[in-house]
Amino acid sequence: MKRILVALLERAIRAGVEAGLLPATAPPSIEVELTKDPGHGDYASNVAMILASQVRKDPREIAGVLSQRIEDPEGFLEKIEIAGPGFMNFFIREGVLNRFLADVERESERYGSSDLGKGGRVQVEFVSANPTGPLHIGHARGAVVGDVMANILAAAGYRVFREYYINDTGNQMNNLGLSVFLRYRELLGEAAEFPEGCYRGDYIRDLAAELLKRDGKRYLDMDAEEAIRLFTDYAGSAILGGIKDDLRAFGVVFDLYFSERELYREEGVGMLLRALQDKGFIYREGDALWFRTTAFGDEKDRVVIRQNGAPTYFAADIAYHRNKFLRGFETVIDIWGADHHGYIPRMSAAVQALGYEKEALKVILVQLVNLLREGKPVAMSTRSGEFVTLREVVDEVGKDAARYNFLMRRSDSHLDFDLEVAKRQSNENPVYYVQYAHARICSIIRMAAERGIEMPAFGQADPGLLKLPEEIDLIKAITRFPEVVEGAARTLEPHRLTFYLNDLAAGFHSYYNKNKVISDDAVLTAARLFLVKSVLTVLKNTLKMLGVSAPEKM
RNA sequence: GCGCCCAUGGCUCAGCUGGAUAGAGCGUCAGACUACGAAUCUGAAUGUCGGAGGUUCGAAUCCUCCUGGGCGCGCCA
């Protein structure tokens, strides 16, 4: 409906310009919104005021010109009122909105999808935690945000690819191998000092024990460096395997786990740097190579090759991002912890230096999660091994509650996650509110079937009977869904879905408590069943995008 | 010190990129099951949108300054 009104307004503006009643300025982007107050009609637009400010005329006069020029051959509109400082309020004729329920029936599980992305290829890279330990609660939020963002983009018509970057080289991996090796020696009775930077979690000891059981004590006789390398490989792949399992249990599946080691094959990083050097972005100062990121607005230049000849993390990351674009992605979305925000300018600089548009790289920052139990903070520290793992959270509160909770705030704001509240089956827990609406509708449909009432198709029901204010509101909410998905895709804000879902469920619950769907009036029953079925479809589609189950009973 | 983000009822947060009287949930108080599922609903109270200026028909939203918080400022990843 919104789109139709925008089109009508566009045509009216053009007509006004042609008639010489409006000057031919750049047409503003036309906005139409649902009204909050029924006295303002169903939809309202502020175009007249925008136009007025451009041409210095009375907005109400312009609104008058526009509303006279609006052609409405299909008779959507009851009337247009000009109100306040120059709003145009559209009153939709009774029975018109109901027609849009046919869209829901026709598109069914695809309702809400659009072709906004026009098949453009987008890569979403997320989680990307070092395989030095199991995923913890902090990673969980990024995992859900990335996964759902990918779902939203797919629904909005993009071809989406999910990727996990495995940071499997460098000091941290060495420390992992060393940590396991030290535990191994400890198991064999050798005293071990744990240097700074080592990992102390129980899983380290478990890995050491596995190696001991499998291969005995032969690593003791080996050159220590060689042994640590083997331990690193073993521990890294074992931990990565665990990470994959945990993610799968959380409903997060990647198209590709990309190993950083790939980048070093065939001198990939070196060649890239030479290419950048040719473009003049690399210079030598002292024994190090620097990247001139300041050319693109970074506050200082950054080292890519250290004095000791080793590439920095940044160097590898440049190569990785180039690799992404070479694979044909037009847009690359990275999901990072908010503490990495300072890294954005240099990554953006790198992308531009490689010759890509600044907008080709988008970064979603995800803030930290405060893990609570009954309102009290749970202590966390990776190094010491005291942390609540993703696996434990999923086991304790369940996938649905965990995922939903992580989407209840915009991702760049802090989130309190209370384990006790999340598993409580009460009104404090919003997942159930939505799932309950779904289950309730399923229950109504079951009841109808038991009474031998057939589920009507759109053509069989008389949607014109749906004229209660709550029914109109529900229909409006349903027609809003595709816009919500588009909005979430455009702004990269997955939390919009949970807010929408909550609204829709509230609308339904309220309606349900006031009105009977199934009654003696067969025709009315058919119309209402159709409405409720439409709500069900939207609930189901949204929950699916969130990766949350839609139970038929609970 | 410099840079980025944030500040909205008692608490936790939305606010559709400048619109009409700032909205939810939780908590509090008062109500609703002989009704398709009460994990639900209905109603009530609570706000100088951190403060001060500015931009304009119009500001929670944009600009400047101040206060208070978070984060970043490695040849770490």
Image (spheres, rainbow, N blue to C red):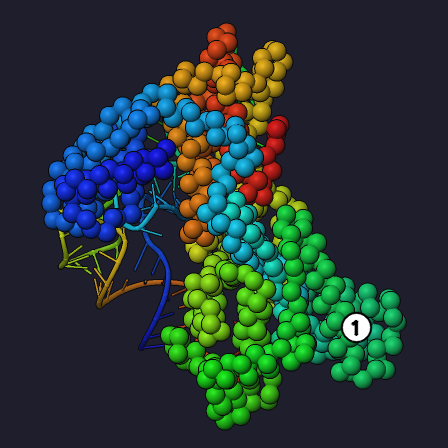
Residue A405 pos. (x, y %): 52, 45
- Determine the chain carrying the residue at label 1: A
Kindly identify the amino acid type of the residue bearing the numbered disc 1.
Tyr
Outermost residue, bottom side: A286
Residue annotated with mark 1: A184
Q: Residue at x 42, y 66 (%)?
A: A358
Outermost residue, front side: A18
Outermost residue, top side: A520
Query: Considering only vertical position in the picture, is A359 above or below A525?
Result: below
State the residue in front, A549 or A65: A65
Query: Considering only vertical position in the picture, is A266 above or below A497?
Result: below
State the residue in front, A518 or A116: A116
Residue A322 pos. (x, y %): 55, 70
Q: Residue at x 54, y 73 (%)?
A: A318
Q: Is residue A338 left or right of residue A67?
A: right
Outermost residue, left side: A57
| Mark 1 Cα-neighbour bin, 10 Å: few <14, some 14–19, many ≥20 | many
Q: Residue at x 47, y 63 (%)?
A: A361
Query: Considering only vertical position in the picture, is A123 above or below A279?
Result: above
Which quarter of the rendered picture does the N terminus of chain A lie within? top left
Residue A376 in sight in this render? no
Q: Residue at x 65, y 77 (%)?
A: A264
